[in-house]
Image (spheres, rainbow, N blue to C red):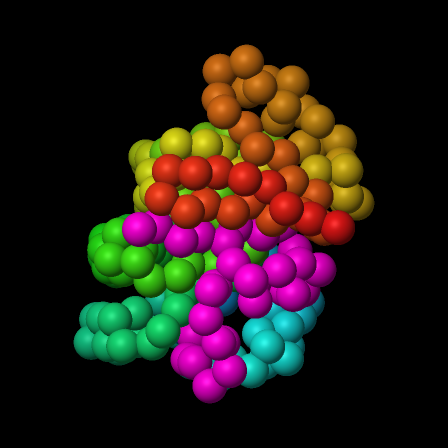
Amino acid sequence: MKKMFLASSFKDVASLLVDFAEEDLKGKTITFIPTASIPEKVKFYVGAGKKALEKLGLAIDELEISIATPGEITDKLQQNHYIYISGGNTFFLLQELRRTKADKLIMDQIHSGKLYIGESAGSMIMAPDITYASSMDDHTKARDLHDFSALNMTKVYPLPHHTNFPFKKTVEKIISKYGSELDLYPISNAQVLLIKGEKVSVQGF
């Protein structure tokens, strides 16, 4: 059964992961993928995410998809207990996941029941398509990406940073443009989109 914890700002909802995981997190190893942050100037959330995971007792095994060997990608995604993809540029992330074929490996692991944690771009990448993210992220940072169909691990479209600076107006613009055609799930930094099988719910503070 698919288990996905799709956050907007992981550090703000990390405590909710304990119940969602339904098992002791301490001592477990997590594949941490920071690739989406590469084209970005602001990257504080990468370190914040790592610290939040470590506070829960998890051991971080970083995997930088864009420079890792195929063997490293396969070994880390298959052998570690959980998978985490951090925030940044959703289009660059999709480009690198697809180029390295890590997308298929991640999809296989999620289908097999491995817990997946996404933050911002790492959440949106699970939608059927990320065209809607073009108001939030610069798609020109992914020059080799010509098709915006994403991992399609959920039929809904996570929309992070709802009501939060500096994305408040951007999120409202996306809702106005795509709200009538896509099943958008706007979540604030204090909320998380929980997916178990085909069941979708939102929790927060």
Magenta highlight on residue 60: no
Figure disc tally: 0
Q: Position of residue 34 (x, y in %)?
A: 49, 66
Apparent side of residue 96 relative to residue 172 in the rendered image (left or right): left
Single out the residue that lies furthest toward the top. 180
Residue 97 placement: quadrant: bottom left
Magenta highlight on residue 15: yes
Q: Looking at the image, which residue is at 59% across and 77% down?
A: 56
Q: Nearer the viewer, residue 40 or 122?
A: 122
Res 13 seen here: yes
Q: Position of residue 9 (x, y in %)?
A: 65, 56
Relative to 20, is 51 above or below?
A: below
Relative to 174, is 111 above or below?
A: below
Q: Nearer the viewer, residue 1 or 179?
A: 1
Q: Looking at the image, which residue is at 55% across and 20% down?
A: 178
The residue segment tinted magenta is: 1-30
Q: Looking at the image, which residue is at 39% across and 32% down?
A: 155
Res 161 seen here: no
Relative to 103, is 175 above or below?
A: above
Apparent side of residue 72 relative to residue 9 in the rendered image (left or right): left
Q: Position of residue 67 (x, y in %)?
A: 34, 72
